[in-house]
Amino acid sequence: MQFSATQIAAIIGGKVEGNGDAAVASFGKIEEARQGQLSFLANPKYEEYLYTTGASVVIINESLELKQPVAATLIKVPDAYTSFAVLLDKYQQIQRQQLSGIQQPVYVDATAKMGEHIFLGAFASIGANVVVGNNVKIYPQAYLGNNVVVGENTIIHPGVKIYHDCIIGKNVVIHAGTVIGSDGFGFAPQPDGTFKKVPQIGNVIIEDGVEIGANTTIDRATIGSTLIKAGAKLDNLLQIAHNVEVGHNTVIAAQSGVSGSTKVGNNVMIGGQAGIVGHITIGDGARINAQSGVSKSLEPGKAVTGSPAFDYTAALRSQATTRKLPELEKRIQELEKQIAALTVKK
């Protein structure tokens, strides 16, 4: 597929400077792009490549003041990074529209209700009373258990497992290998030292516009629902435990874990490998640095780091002081010697 600079500008609301008929058929990084490719410049660190790039078309910020002539056709927009993201999304939509129909072999229970214009990949399994909305893409080897609901325009990548009774909203993306609705980690200790399993009879609800990375696990609730609210973005290799709530537009980076019944607010940012204990509340807009261990509730807007996590600014000061400990130890030893000498003189 080829697109002209004029067509691209119409999609992202940009202004063309140069040859509006310049055509592109693929994408390239600005430092490596060649003729026939589209690139973008958002980070000023890469501006030098704008003047040497082989790209036919480059999307740039309209605020950028050029220091020398540019051979490529330019499309000026308020925010080049966001505009490029919009364009990539449009490109993906076009590619996905080419996927349709039902490959074989698949299993679809007779009671399942399948929407229009869906794609169902080979070896997928659709259980009893499942409801799948229009324009859903279900890739090979995906499993949808009994009574699962999937909203329209959702994409379920290869090998995703969605257990019974779970509800997936509209425009959700779930990447390969993710498991939704497996049992929560509930075991009651017994007098003889053994553990009795507590049945997990709730479900998982994923609201609209959520994206979940590969090989993430989201446990079903003991009773009620584990809830991922609209717009949340979850990275790869996460563990979200039973009865957790993750707020609107919250982002959680890879290898993090949230323990049972914790409520994470809206617009929270959680760095990679962070760990959060159960039964606490993370306030709206909180920031948790990578590898932090959060053991108590955080107020809205709080920024923390470390394990156990505490105030971000105070933690940085503590780290700076820690680096000075060898020097401080020497000073203390010198002061002790001086004090000892004064004591001897008395």
Image (cartoon, rainbow, N blue to C red):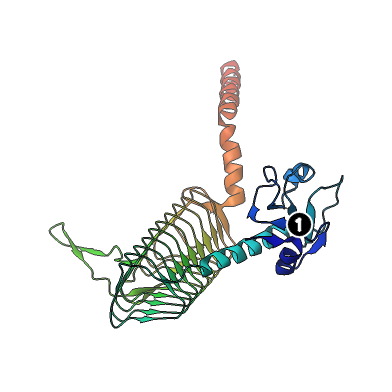
Above or below for 145 versus 69 = below
Residue 162 visible? The answer is: no
> Circle 1: is it few (<14), some (14-19), or many (20+) Cα within 10 Å?
some
Above or below for 340 versus 278 = above
On screen, residue 243 versus residue 1, left or right, reads left
- Residue 304 in which image quadrant: bottom right
Residue 194 visible? The answer is: yes
- Indicate the position of residue 108 as horizontal and vertical percent values: 30, 75
| Residue type at numbered disc 1 | Ala
Q: Residue at x 80, y 44 (%)?
A: 51
On screen, residue 68 versus residue 128, left or right, reads right
Q: Which of the two residues, 101 or 231, is positioned nearer the viewer here?
A: 101
Q: Residue at x 23, y 68 (%)?
A: 198
Q: Which of the two residues, 100 or 28, is positioned nearer the viewer here?
A: 100
Q: Residue at x 42, y 63 (%)?
A: 157
- Residue 277 in which image quadrant: bottom left
Above or below for 154 versus 332 = below
Q: Which of the two residues, 314 or 283, is positioned nearer the viewer here?
A: 283
- Identify residue for label 1: 22
- Indicate the position of residue 280 as horizontal and vertical percent values: 44, 65
Above or below for 292 versus 268 = above
- Indicate the position of residue 331 as horizontal and vertical percent values: 60, 25
Q: Secondary structure at mark 1?
A: loop
- Residue 130 in which image quadrant: bottom left
Q: Quadrant of the C terminus?
A: top right
Q: Quadrant of the N terminus?
A: bottom right
- Indicate the position of residue 182 as horizontal and vertical percent values: 31, 65
